[in-house]
């Protein structure tokens, strides 16, 4: 006996994307999509980003819940960077076809255990080294060894570019890394929690989360945002370019969000970071024109769906402004988000149960 595939049921289930479904309790972060607020363990993102270095923000997020070594986090991350540098040789022998992100995932699997450091510190502390080494290898350059006397932002910049960062570059990187530290149960964090719920290792959860982050509907968007700005070219062409893009049925990268029905607060935090940089950057005026054109075109095209600027739009302009190549945008996102993923893994391991949802079978019936 067979029953024809019921496309109606199938579409209803798959299009829902678990929207509105609560699958975990967390004390880490709250995304209030109605009012446009993001709170990390009791503090607004505006209070953290731009005011705290990355290490201090991670310390705040982890709080008492995430057990770690007795060292200061700056020291623990520095030790983790030194240990992670050993993994660079595994990345070097990888096929030349791998991109920076692939190499980072490979390197993460090869990071050795470091005695005296907690897993959260080893993994989170390794990411800047993996990013920098992978980026340099992909450019045919030798990786630069970490300098344990530096902060994460300083050393990340130095190991990646080979230059000592300006104060502006360090402040900007800190602001960016803090802004994207944690964000409720987004797709990559959910992935990390699903993997952690099977009692797999924290490293497996982070590798899986990195894979989920890579897609353009999630953390893969800022590179395409910069491509879009390049294609638009000048502010006066923004309206026509945006209209043509929407007419072709394409999505505008850097706009829309599953949870926010208003502006993503992180967009403004990053835009403020741009305002603190020297104003001779023509991309800022271009971005503002594209944003204005996009918001009014989206409001006309989708009157029933509030679509506003998300974090990825100004991520692209901000990171570009401090000389970060677009190939580094998603790797940088993963680097800043890793302590958030790790904290969710700890929370899942301590409070959660195997995550195993059901599905409605809408295929042919067996005889
Ligand atoms: N451009 C044009 N139309 C859009 C956009 C966009 N950026 N975003 C949503 N829409 C439209 C959809 O086409 C759909 O229209 P329809 O109902 O007429 O078919 C409607 O708005 C609802 O879209 P959904 O896909 O159901 O919304 P969802 O909540 O699943 O999507 C998402 C959220 C994936 C972020 C979406 O807004 C998008 O694709 N944005 C562009 C990519 C992007 O910027 N990603 C980064 C997100 S932030 C982050 O993850 C860190």
Image (spheres, rainbow, N blue to C red):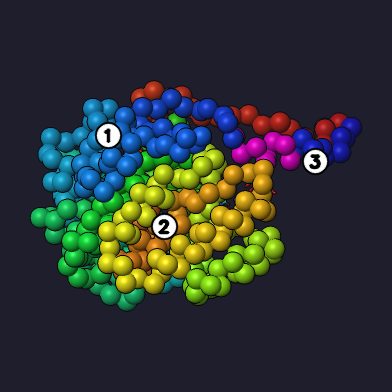
Q: Position of residue 210 (x, y in %)?
A: 43, 50
The answer to whether residue 362 is visible is: yes
Nearer to us: label 3 or label 2:
2
Give the prevailing secondary structure in the magenta stretch.
helix
Q: Name the N-terminal-most of marks 1 and 2.
A: 1
Residue that extends furthest to the left in the rendered view of this protein: 149
Q: Residue at x 59, y 55 (%)?
A: 296
Q: Secondary structure at mark 1?
A: helix
Q: Position of residue 349 (x, y in %)?
A: 37, 28
Q: Position of residue 356 (x, y in %)?
A: 55, 29
Within the image, what quadrant is residue 118 found in? Answer: top left
Badge 2: how crowded within 10 Å, few (<14), some, or many (20+)? Answer: many
Within the image, what quadrant is residue 44 found in? Answer: top left
Q: Which residues are magenta?
A: 11-18
224 or 98, nearer to the observer: 224
Q: Name the N-terminal-most of marks 3 and 2.
A: 3
262 or 58, nearer to the observer: 262
Badge 3: how crowded within 10 Å, few (<14), some, or many (20+)? Answer: few
Look at the image and say whether residue 233 sits in the magenta stretch.
no
Residue that numbered label 2 is attached to: 314
Q: Position of residue 69 (x, y in %)?
A: 16, 36
Left or right, residue 25 beside residue 72: right
278 or 114, nearer to the observer: 278
Image: 244 above or below 54:
below
Look at the image and say whether residue 12 sits in the magenta stretch.
yes
Q: Are marks 3 and 2 in contact (CB under 8 Å)?
A: no
User: Which image quarter holds the C terminus?
Assistant: top right
Q: Secondary structure at mark 3?
A: helix
Q: Residue at x 32, y 31 (%)?
A: 41
Residue that numbered label 3 is attached to: 7
Residue that numbered label 1 is attached to: 62
């Amino acid at each position: 006996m067979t029953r024809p595939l019921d496309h109606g049921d199938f579409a209803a289930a798959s299009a829902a994307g678990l929207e509105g479904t609560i699958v975990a309790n967390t004390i880490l972060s709250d995304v209030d999509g109605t009012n446009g607020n993001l709170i990390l363990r009791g503090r607004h993102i505006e209070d953290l980003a731009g005011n705290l270095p990355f290490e201090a923000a991670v310390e705040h997020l982890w709080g008492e819940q995430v057990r770690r070594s007795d060292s200061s986090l700056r020291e623990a991350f520095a030790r983790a960077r030194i240990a992670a540098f050993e993994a660079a040789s595994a990345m070097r022998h990888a096929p030349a076809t791998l991109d920076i992100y692939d190499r980072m995932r490979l390197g993460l699997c090869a990071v050795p255990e470091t005695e005296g450091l907690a897993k959260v510190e080893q993994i989170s502390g390794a990411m800047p080294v993996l990013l920098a080494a992978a980026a340099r290898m992909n450019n045919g350059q030798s990786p630069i060894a970490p300098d344990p006397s530096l902060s994460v932002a300083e050393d990340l910049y130095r190991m990646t570019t080979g230059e000592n960062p300006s104060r502006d570059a360090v402040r900007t990187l800190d602001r960016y890394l803090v802004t994207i530290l944690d964000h409720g149960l987004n797709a990559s964090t959910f992935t990390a929690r699903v993997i952690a719920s099977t009692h797999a290792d924290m490293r497996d959860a982070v590798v899986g989360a990195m894979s989920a982050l890579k897609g353009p509907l999630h953390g893969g968007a800022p590179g395409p945002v910069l491509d879009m700005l390049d294609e638009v070219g000048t502010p006066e062409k923004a309206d026509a370019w945006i209209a043509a893009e929407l007419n072709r049925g394409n999505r505008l990268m850097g706009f829309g969000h599953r949870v926010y029905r208003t502006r993503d607060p992180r967009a403004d935090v990053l835009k403020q970071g741009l305002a603190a940089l020297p104003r001779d950057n023509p991309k800022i005026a271009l971005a503002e024109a594209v944003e204005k054109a996009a918001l009014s075109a989206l409001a006309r095209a989708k009157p029933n769906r509030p679509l506003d600027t998300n974090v990825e739009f100004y991520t692209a302009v901000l990171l570009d402004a401090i000389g970060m190549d677009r190939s580094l945008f998603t790797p940088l996102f993963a680097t800043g988000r890793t302590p958030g993923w790790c904290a969710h893994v700890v929370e899942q391991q301590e409070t959660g149960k195997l995550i195993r949802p059901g599905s409605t079978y809408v295929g042919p019936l067996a005889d």
